[in-house]
Image (cartoon, rainbow, N blue to C red):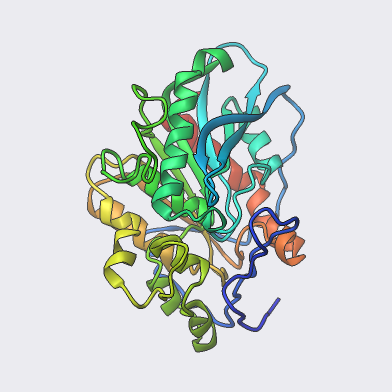
């Protein structure tokens, strides 16, 4: 499927029904170096199946309250899936994608259920986006608040919160990477919020990260595309630029390289960073595969466990809802891919 490049995103006013990011699809994508990665053939199935294990759903749990652009309370919610099996369940926090415009906690229901049925409590958390006037620091702070909330209420929901994994797709993968790399880094707890962090006394740290086709360097990803796509992505005031610089920005991503570098999870990698699992499609023309490679390489250079899978011919995750492309979802919901995810979780969280 090919599309002409367009303005990076368009969005209706906050709260408008049907708000949807408009996505630039590049005509060409530079290949990445896969010498340190595992290349998988086109994942054609079998697809995952759910229903073998009972799962309890706790919906619309408010984990924090912020202020919206009008100074009104903005509750942030999560949904929690807990398998109906004995004993406390290790926790996985899922961060949905949405181009910095959306953060629908209802995303990826089958994949989340499949992981829950494998023995994990899976929370899907919404976070603030550019429609709420948020920057990446705010969204990371929201994710950490969700983790602290779940640790504080672990006994109520039957959770084992001694080890927590964060799992994200696309923009959610980018934020998950920042959550994993910014342990004890000032400015990533509750910026722009008066008072102490939500649920003080509980940690927002994680012990494992799953990054599916997320960004890392928000400027370098543009360089991997054709000139038309680069021009569209470097317009002033795109949601990506607003997510870095703030909602009223007139800047493009090319106008302040230091601010863009500060938004790159590779900047914060240390030897204490938790292990990572990355996935990327070789034909991803929304977030080029070099983005996960940049982070994977930085992790390896610091001696951090990092595994990167490249799916031959796969595109950018589940675009079926956004672009009417159901085939784009299929490689990401196979037993093979989800098996790598549950295997990684078993290694680092137990089960």
Residue 292 in picture, x, y percent from top left? 42, 60
Q: Residue at x 58, y 31 (%)?
A: 122
Residue 236 in picture, x, y percent from top left? 46, 77
Number of disc labels? 0
Q: Residue at x 71, y 41 (%)?
A: 110
Figure check: 49 above or below 80: below
Figure check: 211 above or below 252: above
Query: Quadrant of residue 120 in the image?
Result: top right
Figure check: 188 above or below 262: above
Q: Is residue 302 left or right of residue 351?
A: left
Query: Quadrant of residue 77 in the image?
Result: top right
Q: Quadrant of the N terminus?
A: bottom right
Residue 102 in picture, x, y percent from top left? 61, 54
Q: Residue 336 versus residue 262: which sits nearer the camera?
A: 262
Q: Residue 167 versus residue 232: which sits nearer the camera?
A: 232
Q: Is residue 217 left or right of residue 2?
A: left
Q: Residue at x 73, y 66 (%)?
A: 323
Q: Is residue 73 left or right of residue 302?
A: right
Residue 76, can we see it?
yes
């Amino acid at each position: 499927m090919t599309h002409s490049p367009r303005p990076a995103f368009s969005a209706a006013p906050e709260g408008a029904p049907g708000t949807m990011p408009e996505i630039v699809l590049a005509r060409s994508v530079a290949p990445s170096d896969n010498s340190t990665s595992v290349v998988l053939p086109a994942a054609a199935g079998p697809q995952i199946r759910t229903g073998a294990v009972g799962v309890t759903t706790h919906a619309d749990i408010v984990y924090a309250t912020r202020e919206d652009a009008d100074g009104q309370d903005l509750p942030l919610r999560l949904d929690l899936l807990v398998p109906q099996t004995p004993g406390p369940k290790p926790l996985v926090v899922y961060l949905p994608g949405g181009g910095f415009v959306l953060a629908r906690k209802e995303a990826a229901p089958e994949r989340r259920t499949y992981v829950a049925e494998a023995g994990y409590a899976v929370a899907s958390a919404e976070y603030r986006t550019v429609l709420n006037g948020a920057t990446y620091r705010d969204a990371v702070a929201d994710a950490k608040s969700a983790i602290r909330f779940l640790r504080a209420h672990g006994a109520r929901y039957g959770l084992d919160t001694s080890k927590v994994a964060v799992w994200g797709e696309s923009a959610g993968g980018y934020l998950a990477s920042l959550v994993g790399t910014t342990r004890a880094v000032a400015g990533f707890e509750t910026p722009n919020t008066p008072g102490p962090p939500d649920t003080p006394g509980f940690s927002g740290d994680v012990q494992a990260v799953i990054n599916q086709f997320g960004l890392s360097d928000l400027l370098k990803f543009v360089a991997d595309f054709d000139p038309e796509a680069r021009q569209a992505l470097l317009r002033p005031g795109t949601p990506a630029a607003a997510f870095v610089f703030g909602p009223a920005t007139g800047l493009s991503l090319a106008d302040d390289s230091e601010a863009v570098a500060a938004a790159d999870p590779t900047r914060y990698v240390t030897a204490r960073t938790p292990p990572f699992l990355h996935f990327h499609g070789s034909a991803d023309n929304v977030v080029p595969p070099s983005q996960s490679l940049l982070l994977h390489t930085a992790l390896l250079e610091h001696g951090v466990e990092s595994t990167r899978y490249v799916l031959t011919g796969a595109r950018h995750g589940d675009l079926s809802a956004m672009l009417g492309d159901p085939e784009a979802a299929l490689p990401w919901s196979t037993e093979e891919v989800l098996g790598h995810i549950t295997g990684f979780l078993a290694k680092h969280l137990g089960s």
